[in-house]
Each structure stands twice: as C-alpha cells, then as structure tokens.
C-alpha cells in the first residue's frame, strides 16, 4: 500500500468470523427448503443453540423450523475455540449475524438479476424472495447457483434491531423436548453400533503412582475384552457396562499404589496460598491526580475455598479407532482444543483426529470432560476398531477433575478524615484459573500425566487481562477511587488441581470488594446503595443497582432475624452488568429467602434464556456461599460424594426475581456468569445486616459464623 | 439364573439376571432404557429415579429382586411428544431446565407426588423433590412447572 495515501481503517469482521471467514463453514442451503447452520460453539445447557438459531432466522428471514443446527465437530464446524466466558452470544452470535446478513445480500443480488427487479424492491419472507408485479423466487430455488465457499467481507450490514422479528423474543429452546421426553440426546445415552464399555482405575491418594497391578481377579470377569496399562494409567474394556464395573472392581483389588503427594492444610488455606512460591503481576496501578490526606488505613482478608464443578452426570466420552485415525465424541467445551491436546499425547497429526460434540450435563467450566475423552481414546486402542464409551465414577468426578481455585484476597483502604476512600490496594493469592487443553505445548489431560512416559503436570495459568484475566478477574474496582494498586500472585506449585470454574476469580474478588465497600459505608453510616451510586460514573451500572434496589423495596424495614444486603459487578468489567439484593434469615443457620436481581446484557436475544441463566447463576452462587467447599486431608480429597460435598436442595432454594434491562441497540453479551459475584456479596452483606457479623471466609456456614463471631469479639 | 418378573411401563417383563444387580443397571443395560440417568450410584442425587408403585425411588440403589411383581414406570413411560403427560407439557411451557440431565428423575419424583397428592402446595412440591439434585439452578422453574401440571390435571 502506498504510505502517502492513507485509507480509512478497514471495517473489521467479528472475531470468530475473522478466524473462520469462509461463509460456507457457517451456513449451507438445500433445494428442499432447509438451512444447515454449523456454529463452533456448543450446547452446555445454556440455550446457546436456540439463541444462535434466533439470530440466523432473523437475519435470513426464514422460519426457525427450517434451520438445522449441527453440533460442533472438527470435521464440519468453524474453529471457535472454547465455549466459555459468557462469550458465545458475543462471538458466535455476532459472526453468524454477519454471515447471514452477507449471504442474504448475495441471494438478493442473484434474485435481482433473475427477476429483473432492483434489490431494494425485493422482500424476503420465510426464504421466499418477492418483488413488484408478483415476481418471486426463493433461497431454495437459487441455492444451487450460489457459491458460499468464499470469504466474508467486512461491509455486510445486519438489520436494524427494530426490524428483527425473533431476537428479543423468548422462544422455546429447541433442545428441551428431547430432554423432557427422555429421548437419547446426552452422550451417556447414545450407544454406537458394536460399542464396548470402558472404565479407568484412579488412585485414592492424590497423585499416587501405580506400582503393581495384578490382573488375576479381572481376567475371569464375564465380557472382559482387555485390560490396558501404561504406567499409572490403567483401565478395562468390556462388552457390557456391568462387566466393565465388575472388572474395574477386580482391578482395584489387584492394584498397589505409592503414597502419593501431600495436600495442603485445609483448615488454613489462606496461609498456604500466601506462603507458596508465586509470580506477581501488577494488574492495574492508578496514581492520584491530587494529594489526598489519608488519616487511617484499614485492611481485611477474604478467602474462598476450592469449589467443585460437580456436574450431575459423571464425565463421559466415546472413541473409535480406524487404523491410525480416531473419532472422538465428547461433551468438551472446545472440540478443536481437545483435538490439539489429543494430537500431542498420541503424537498424531490433527488431521487424523476428528472430535465431535455431544451434549453432556452442565459443566460450569473445565471439568473432566476433556480428561475422559483421552481415557476413551487410550482404552479404544485395545478394542480392535470397535467404539468404546467411558464414564467416570461419581468419586473420580469429585476428586480427579479440576476444581475452581481457592483464593486469598487482601484489601487495604486508606481513608481520609471523612471516611472516604483515598487509596485502595487489592492483592490476590491463588493458583491459576485456567488449565484448559489446546493452549500450550504440553497437554492438560489427566491421563497424559499418568502414562509410563508421562507429560509434566500442567500448572494452571491465568488468561490475559484483555480476555478478562483469571484470578484477577473483576479485581479492578469500577468505583471512582482516586488511586489504587491491584496485584495478583499466581502460585507456581499446584498440589490441588485447578482450572476454569464459572467466573474464574470474579466470584472471590467481587465478594471481597463488595463486602469491604459495605463495611466502609456502614462505618460512615451511609446507605450501601447510595454509597455505591455516589462512586459510580457508568449509568448502566447505576441503572442495574437502582432497578434491583427498587424492585426489592430497598431499604426494607429492619426486622429481627432478617437481613438485607446488596452486591454489584459488571462481569469482567466489560460484560453484563448485574446487581443483586439478598434477603436472608439468620439464626443458627443462614437461609436465603429471596434474591432480587437486575441485569443488563445489552441486546437480550432470548430474554427468558437470560433470566434462566441469571436465576441459575444466582441459585448456584447461593449453593457455593452456603455449602460448598472441597474437603481433603493431607493425602486425599475426601469430599467425593454428595454427602460430603452437599449442594443446595429444593427446600433451601431462595425465591429469585430477575429484571432484564433490554437494550436492543447495544451488542449482546453473555449472562451465564454475571450473577455469581453480586449474589455472593449480597448474601454476605445481608448476613452482616442480620447478625452484625462479617464472614470473610467462604462458605458461610454455622462454623464460619461462630469463627467470625469469635474473631469479632 | 433365576428370573425376576415385573411390569415395566405397563408391559410384562421377565428378566434373567443376577437378582442382586441394581435395577438401573438392568434398565440401562439389557433393557436399553436410557431415560433413568446414572448420577452417583449411591441413591444420593435422584437422576435415576423411577416410580415403583406410587413412590419415586433411586433405581441405582434398588436391587432387581426387590421389584419382583411390582409396577415400574420409567421416564419413557410417562408420556410422549404425541401424548405428553401434563408434567412434560408444563416443563416445556416453563422452560424448566438448563442442561436437563436431572430432569428425567425429577419428572419421576413429581409424577409420584401428583399420584399421591393431586393438589400439592409449593412447599410440598419442594419436599417431594428434595432428594433430587439440580446443579444448574432450575429449581424454582421446576416447582412452578409441577404446580402448573397439577392445575391442569385438576381442571380436566
């Protein structure tokens, strides 16, 4: 390009589309009146496939029933990385909207030629293109003459928000009928012809090595096809699921293990986190524009424990070898990323591996979905070309899958004579919050660490700040304090395996910031809602706080045994705005009676889908706050069942009310992780309102209340 | 091997299998019924609930011998898209799930409740579903759906 003639900056393609610009990788039309849509994001119970169908139907002007939404596969879908971070509507949705807008124009162009009518005079209704004088054609008629194997161009323009018929409506999710009528849809329920069943033997003690394995008790079990062993990785393949379980039980009896590696002291996680070797990153540093007279400093420490993903279904996968090619069926959140790691472990070209998505239970982040896929691939090697389905046990799911990382957070605020914040320091100590596959030169899959020729155990890292960060997610306050310093200490050891759990570090950081703010406001005898509003400049932030407060009739009259609290955050500081008001009852135990939330996700494509996500997030966060904590002794994880790792039950679930602030003119962002931080803080603040006790170590249980009371007295 | 007879979704069954095997194992294995889902294998989550007589029970925790001569309903026996049970219609209307893995067991608990108590209160629905775990947080929608189904059944 000639440097003398500057051209306007080129319009940009949406991120996912720039990475996968070929139009045909997203859409195909059939002469029979169908549109095949192949997004790279996957259904994990969040309703994304329906939201994407709404977007495509709108932009193409076809009835949604004409869309065939295809599950992601490395064989047929664009590479959209991982389905995480509440980015699917944002990334896949924008890409698909752009593709559909461009394809619509291409069809209109050809229709105009054929019909001899200007493009502007044409209209599309359910795929039929018509113009003045009753001329008509259709996508289906023209499909054969349209070539979509060309790259998207930046200048396609989508419809105005006001002209969209589908987006903004709460249509029913397309995956729900199968699930309600018990039709096989989950990977656990889909048997391939000739399929065998596999089970993997995992140690009880953390990272114990398999020193001896007697197969004697296993050989006699009916249906046994193979016993597989490679180092500390061992498993069985059987004709039946029952046989696989029995063979595994036999194998367990014949196994001798080393002692394993010690785990930290569960009773003082903050001390453990703060004394490990770590890497310091300055996340943000704001220096004051004017000198402020600091008269005193207050410092508080908060923590949250390791939290399990604890899906209701144990992780499951299927694999089938054909010569040196392998096909994998998985509920992984990233088919391409899993493929990359499988290629590393198998030392195989990625072209030899096909990874196809099938639905599993909700995963809430990086659980064992990817691990079990490698297990299936390794066991299927011994299956003589037959497919093998592997499922983990409940115990393995609760002890060997990665956990959400424990966090210690220290906040220090300098206050002036009026009790106003003049400086702020926020420090986080935590393992990294991400060890997903496909991102490094080494694999992140469990069995890869167990092989005779093992790969090194991956130590979790944190996503870059530009992607919302990890342990530091939401650590930078949105409040207008004149100066601050935000730092993150990422541990370089990892005795407890951690990776992405919904919100990464945001839940811990928002809990800490919003608890501390509440404390400062209380000291000033200032209403916590007013205090927040006074320190925010962003009107969308203020709107969700005002909406939640109004709906909850803030501030309700003081009643004995009842407390109210508020929490607010904008997820990742760039995503959805959410404010929550909690009403709790507190005597011996804390019961959350009601949560009132307001959320702003920009354009809400499927408002009921947004509400469903916010309700679910609020209830899950309540469960984290009141109940959840991974338990362990110095040798092993001990919370391996639902008795030792309880989650919130129907009788304990609060009423949840959600207000969606619809902003159809603004780009949509995800809703799946917006509620956790605000709800956590709102409950903690309501506990203080009710009992006058600040619980700074999660979960808030009878024990932690007693501990906090003792500390306070 | 001794055989165990029972009625499954209205059809007579005669199963030749070790009577100590779990009902879930028999249903999902030789009988090919994937409606009841495996969740924990210890009767702690309710994902595998089926109805035996008029009670919802965890099939993973139920030995085959104990269902001799009993009436068993699995999620497959509740209704179909063509002839849905009011609960199924209500779960769709309320969009009462996220991932849906726990739903088949929850439908069983709810259906058993409505057999015994056709007009439950919200509190009674919560009690009836208390042994079922849901991790996505769809509880309130599910309770609403059960109440809606009860209303619909009462109106007929």
Image: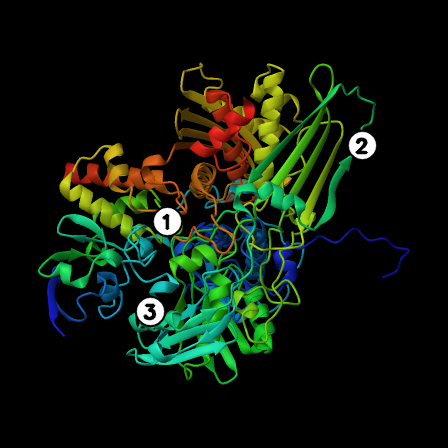
Using the image as rendered, state which of residue B113 and residue B119 is in the foreground: B113
Q: Nearer the viewer, mark 1 or mark 2?
A: 1
Q: Using residue A269 as the reference point, say whether residue A234 is left or right of it.
A: left
Disc number placed over residue A245 in the picture, else none: 3
> Which residue is disc 1 drawn over?
A642
Q: Which image quadrant: the N terminus of chain A?
A: bottom right
Indicate which disc, 1 or 2, sits on the residue closer to the N terminus: 2
Q: How many numbered markers are drawn?
A: 3
Subunit under mark 1: A
Mark 2 residue crowding within 10 angstroms, few (<14) / some (14–19) / many (20+):
few
Alpha-carbon span between mark 1 and mark 3: 21 Å
State the image quarter where residue B67 is shown. Answer: bottom left
SS of the residue at dot 2? loop
Q: Using residue A138 as the reference point, say whether residue B82 is left or right of it.
A: left
> Which residue is disc 2 drawn over?
A287
What residue is drawn where x is 37% and y is 70%?
Answer: A253
Q: Position of residue A558 (x, y in %)?
A: 44, 14
Subunit under mark 2: A
Q: Give the vertical position of A608 relative to A556 (above or below).
A: below
Indicate which disc, 1 or 3, sits on the residue closer to the N terminus: 3
Alpha-carbon span between mark 1 and mark 2: 48 Å
Decide: marks 1, 3 in contact (CB < 8 A)?
no
Would residue A442 be seen by someone viewing this image from the given angle?
A: yes
SS of the residue at dot 3? helix
């Amino acid at each position: 390009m000639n440097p003398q003639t500057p051209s306007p900056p080129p319009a940009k393609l949406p991120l996912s589309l720039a990475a996968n610009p070929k139009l045909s990788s997203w859409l195909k039309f059939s002469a029979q009146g169908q549109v095949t849509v192949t997004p790279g994001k996957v259904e994990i119970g969040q309703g994304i496939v329906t939201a994407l169908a709404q977007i495509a139907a709108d932009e193409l002007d076809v009835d949604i029933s004409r869309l065939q939404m295809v599950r992601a596969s490395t064989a047929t879908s664009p590479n959209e990385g991982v389905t995480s971070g509440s980015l699917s509507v944002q990334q896949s949705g924008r890409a698909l909207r752009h593709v559909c807008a461009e394809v619509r124009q291409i069809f209109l162009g050809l229709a105009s030629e054929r019909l001899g009518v200007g493009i502007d005079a044409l209209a599309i209704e359910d795929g039929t293109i018509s113009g003045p004088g009753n001329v008509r054609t259709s996508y289906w008629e023209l499909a054969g003459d349209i070539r979509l194997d060309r790259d998207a161009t930046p200048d396609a323009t989508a419809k105005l928000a006001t002209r969209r018929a589908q987006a903004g409506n709460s249509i029913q999710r397309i995956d729900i009928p199968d699930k309600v009528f018990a039709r096989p849809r989950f990977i656990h329920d889909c048997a391939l012809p000739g399929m065998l069943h596999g089970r993997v033997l995992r140690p009880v003690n953390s990272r114990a090595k398999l020193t001896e394995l007697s197969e004697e008790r296993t050989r006699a079990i009916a249906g046994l096809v193979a016993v597989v062993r490679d180092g500390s990785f061992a498993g069985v393949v059987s004709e039946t699921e029952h046989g696989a379980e029995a063979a595994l039980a036999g194998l367990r009896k014949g196994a001798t293990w080393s002692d394993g590696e010690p785990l930290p002291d569960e009773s003082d996680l903050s001390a453990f986190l703060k004394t490990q070797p770590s890497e310091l990153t300055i996340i943000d540093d704001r220096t004051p524009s004017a000198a402020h007279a600091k008269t005193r400093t207050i410092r508080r420490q908060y923590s949250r424990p390791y939290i399990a993903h604890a899906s209701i279904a144990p992780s499951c996968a299927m694999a089938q070898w054909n010569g040196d090619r392998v096909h994998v069926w998985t509920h992984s959140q990233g088919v391409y990323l899993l493929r990359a790691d499988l290629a590393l472990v198998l030392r195989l070209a990625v072209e030899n591996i096909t990874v196809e998505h099938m639905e599993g239970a909700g995963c809430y982040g990086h659980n064992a979905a990817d691990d079990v896929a490698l297990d299936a691939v390794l066991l299927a090697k011994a299956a003589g070309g037959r497919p093998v389905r592997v499922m983990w046990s409940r115990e393995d799911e609760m002890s060997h899958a990665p956990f959400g990382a424990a966090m210690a957070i220290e906040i220090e605020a300098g206050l002036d004579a009026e009790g106003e914040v003049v400086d702020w320091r926020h420090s986080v100590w935590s393992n990294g919050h991400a060890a997903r596959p496909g991102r490094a030169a080494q694999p992140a899959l469990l069995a890869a660490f167990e092989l005779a020729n093992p790969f090194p155990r991956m130590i979790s890292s944190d996503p870059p700040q530009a992607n919302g960060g990890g342990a530091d997610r939401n650590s930078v306050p949105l409040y207008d304090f004149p100066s601050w310093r935000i730092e993150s200490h990422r541990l370089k050891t990892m005795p407890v395996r951690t990776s992405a759990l919904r919100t990464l570090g945001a839940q811990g950081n928002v809990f800490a910031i919003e608890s501390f703010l509440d404390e400062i406001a209380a000291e000033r005898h200032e209403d916590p809602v007013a205090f927040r509003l006074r320190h925010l400049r962003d009107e969308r932030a203020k709107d969700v706080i005002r909406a939640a407060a109004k709906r909850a009739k803030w501030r309700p009259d003081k009643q004995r045994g009842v407390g109210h609290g508020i929490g607010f955050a904008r997820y990742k500081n760039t995503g959805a705005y959410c404010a929550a008001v909690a009403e709790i009852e507190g005597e011996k135990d804390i019961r959350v009676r009601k949560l009132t939330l307001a959320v702003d996700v920009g354009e809400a494509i499927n408002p009921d889908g947004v509400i469903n996500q916010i309700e679910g997030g609020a209830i899950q966060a309540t469960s984290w706050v009141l109940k959840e904590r991974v338990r362990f002794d110095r040798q092993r994880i001990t919370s391996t069942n639902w008795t030792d790792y309880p989650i919130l039950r129907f009788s304990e679930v609060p009423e949840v009310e959600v207000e969606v602030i619809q902003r159809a003119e603004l780009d949509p962002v995800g809703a799946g992780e917006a509620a956790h931080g605000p709800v956590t803080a709102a409950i903690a603040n309501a506990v203080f309102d009710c009992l006058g006790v600040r619980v700074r170590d999660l979960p808030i249980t009878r024990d932690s209340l007693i501990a906090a009371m003792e500390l306070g007295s | 091997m001794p055989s165990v007879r029972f009625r499954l979704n209205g059809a007579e069954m005669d199963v030749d299998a070790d009577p100590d095997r779990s009902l879930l194992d028999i249903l999902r294995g030789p009988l090919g019924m994937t409606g009841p889902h495996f969740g924990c294998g210890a009767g702690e989550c309710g994902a595998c609930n089926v109805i035996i007589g008029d009670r919802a029970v965890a099939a993973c925790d139920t030995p085959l011998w104990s269902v001799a001569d009993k009436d068993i309903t699995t999620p497959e026996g509740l209704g179909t898209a063509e002839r849905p049970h009011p609960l199924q219609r209500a779960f769709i209307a309320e969009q009462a799930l996220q991932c849906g893995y726990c739903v088949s067991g929850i439908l069983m608990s709810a259906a058993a409740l409505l057999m015994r108590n056709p007009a439950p209160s919200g509190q009674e629905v919560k009690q009836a579903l208390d042994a079922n775990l849901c991790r996505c947080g769809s509880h309130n929608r599910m309770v609403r759906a059960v109440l809606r189904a009860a209303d619909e059944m009462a109106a007929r």
